[in-house]
Amino acid sequence: MKFRDTIVSIITRFMLPFITLFGLYLIVHVHISPGGGFSGGTVVGAGFVLLSLTYGISMQERKFSHRTSTLIESGGALVYIFFGIVAFFYGQPFLSNLPIFPAGDPGRLFSGGFIAFLNIAIGVKVASTIVALFDSLGGEDLH
């Protein structure tokens, strides 16, 4: 059963791009401001849950199907582990900053070196996990 209300539909349609953009901002700017891959991924995933609650699971599945979210969830974890293992080939500890990614200037967007890529992988994994969990736990009631 989907929640059909004109005001909620209009607000969701207006706010969803801003919710997604804010989640992506949190993911990318983790190393220079409060936020992170987990919190940003949660915001992005919550946007897809809002889409499902407002328009039904069929609308959300057109944008981000359950199979896609499961594949991206697994891919995010594999990319995170891959980045950690690559450090071994450079003689560094697991998940350490690699010499191919310069540290840069403190306070700038690309100043965290390798950390930004790790947080993007975490954000993608968390967002897709939230969507997959919502589909699995409550999705069948929204068809």
Image (tube, grey):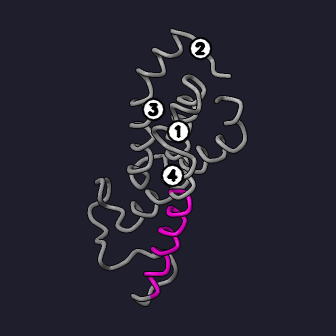
Q: Earlier in the sequence, mark 4 or mark 3?
A: 3
Say whether residue 80 is magenta.
yes
Q: Residue at the location (47% across, 16% down)?
A: 11
Q: Write down the residue under mark 2.
A: 4
- Separation (CA) of disc 4 from disc 2: 26 Å
Q: Whole-percent x and y of residue 66?
A: 57, 47
Instruction: Tell me the residue that label 1 is attached to.
Output: 61
Mark 4–mark 1 contact, CB under 8 Å?
no
Q: Amino acid at mark 3?
A: Ile
- For image coordinates 45% across by 14% down, the residue present is 10
Q: SS class of the residue under badge 2?
A: loop
User: Which residue is at 32% across, 79% downward?
Assistant: 99
Distance from disc 1 to disc 2, alpha carbons, whole Å, reads 18 Å
Front-most of residues 71 and 87: 71
Q: CA distance from mark 2 to mark 3?
A: 21 Å
SS of the residue under disc 3: helix
Task: Note whether 90 is above or below 21 in the view shown.
Answer: below
Which residue, given by chain and number where applicable, does mark 3 sit on?
Answer: 19
Q: Amino acid at mark 2?
A: Arg
Mark 4 or mark 1: whose residue is earlier in sequence = 1
User: In the image, which disc is placed on residue 111?
Assistant: none
Could you tell which of marks 2 and 3 lies nearer the N-terminus? 2
Which image quarter is the N terminus in? top right
Q: CA distance from mark 4 to mark 1?
A: 9 Å
Amino acid bearing label 4: Thr
User: Where residue 143 sits in the image (x, y, percent)?
Assistant: 64, 30
Residue at which label 4 appears = 68
Total tally of numbered discs in the picture = 4
